[in-house]
Amino acid sequence: MKNIYGALCCGLALFTFGCATAPETEAPAPAEAPETPVVQEVQEVQPAPNSKASVTTKFFAKNKLGQTVMQYTLKGAGGVVMDVINYGGKVVRLYLPDKNGESKDCTLGFNDVAGYETVDPYFGSIIGRYGNRIANGLFVIDGVTYRLPTNNEPGGIPCCLHGGAAGWDTKIWNAQPFQNGDTVGVVFTTTSPDGDQGFPGKVEAKVTYTLTPENVWRIEYEAVPDKKTPINLTQHIYFNFNGEAEGTILDHELTLCCDKMTPVDAGLIPTGEITPVAGTPFDFTTPHKIGERVDTKGDKQLEYGNGYDHNFVLTNPSKNGELAQAAALYDEKSGRYMEVWTTEPGIQFYCGNFLTDKMVGKQGKAYQFRGGLALETQHYPDSPNQPNFPSTIVEPGQVYKTTTEYRFGTK
Ligand code: GLA
């Protein structure tokens, strides 16, 4: 049997120290990514006898191209329930029991595809091929310059964010729900063609969501390119343990098992430095309420992000493919608690600084500034342009493989 933790993200093994010295040539113009053919296979899952867990499939909505989007409800034997869709692998609803056993939807999202197609800040999505930012949408591999169309410009500085305007969050993925005893899940697969959003190489991708009876949501990412290309996959779920559209996350207590971070410039692009968090508002090595220091006057990093929107570096990252703890999140009122464990060396903590009341959520209530937070496990942003960061370049035929777990509970 395949050992799911058996292989570290291959990027860890491949450190590059400087750009290629060969004369630079231009990569061919990015190909228009052809639509992935959508095969609607509704596969009903046989329930396991005597299990409280189940998987059910139903129609979610049509997207703007008229394609059908399906919803998979993963009912965990431990009480956590999630609705996920094959459009971007998005988690639309996440019901988490509180300390009294009462469940509430604790994630931001929309009831229809139209919301996701218009104002969506990547709610609940798989992010690929490259989570986070690539400066100016440019990188060089073996002397060839690749130009990615830019889709984001914080501080007026353009970059390619989260894999481009039509990243993997906008794809309809093939989906295969499954149940093994008390464990339920969905396997999402897709093919990203050569030139998709300007990136070199065709990539075969597989993302498996598993919900265990212990209330662990495990995400296993696998991707195999046919050309040398950067890959950095993550999940962009937003949490609010008070409930969806129920105020801000400023009273949530966060721990980050990270003694360093990667400071950014005004474009939210890493400067290349890796600096200690000690003595700064970025020190979450012991639990702190998010609101406590988020508006610290005179802190340039908080000013650039308009709050926390930074990559943190794990103090004790994964070794030999074993999961390492990256974060813990706790809301005293509800008692909801979560740990994040990962094989990745970094985690982006984003406290919802771009959220506004222009986005209306699932209960018809407007979201608010800092109304949700994301903890995105990842390699560091802009790694293709940062020679001192662990490499994200994957070789042709090499299997990129990472795992992250969100472990839910109460205290
Ligand atoms: C990421 C980025 C943020 C923001 C959100 C989406 O988390 O780090 O700057 O772009 O995605 O709104």
Image: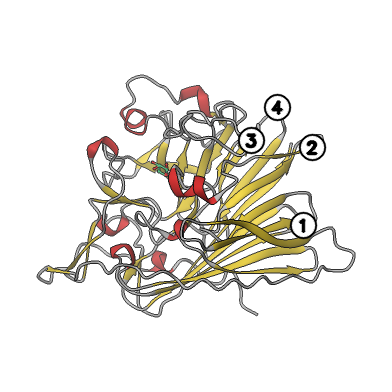
Disc 4 marks which residue? 333
Mark 2 Cα-neighbour bin, 10 Å: few <14, some 14–19, many ≥20:
few
The amino acid marked with disc number 3 is Gln
Q: Are marks 4 and 3 in contact (CB under 8 Å)?
A: no
Is the CB of the residue bearing disc 2 within 8 angstroms of ligand 1? no
The amino acid marked with disc number 4 is Lys
The amino acid marked with disc number 1 is Pro
**Residue at horizontal 69 percent and vertical 60 percent from the top:** 58
Q: Element type at marker 4?
A: loop
In x, y percent, where is residue 74? Answer: 71, 57
In this rendering, position of residue 179 left or right of residue 132: right
- Residue 213's disc is 1
The amino acid marked with disc number 2 is Glu
Mark 3 Cα-neighbour bin, 10 Å: few <14, some 14–19, many ≥20:
few
Mark 2 or 3, which is nearer the eye?
3
Mark 2 or mark 1, which is nearer the start of the sequence? 2
**Residue at horizontal 28 percent and vertical 59 percent from the top:** 384
Mark 1 or 2, which is nearer the eye?
2
Mark 1 or mark 3, which is nearer the start of the sequence? 1
**Cα gap from disc 1 to disc 2, whole angstroms:** 17 Å
Q: Is residue 298 above or below residue 338?
A: above
Q: Are marks 4 and 2 in contact (CB under 8 Å)?
A: no
Instruction: Name the quadrant containing residue 12.
Output: bottom left
Q: Quadrant of ligand 1?
A: top left
Disc 3 marks which residue? 363
Q: Is residue 135 above or below residue 294?
A: below
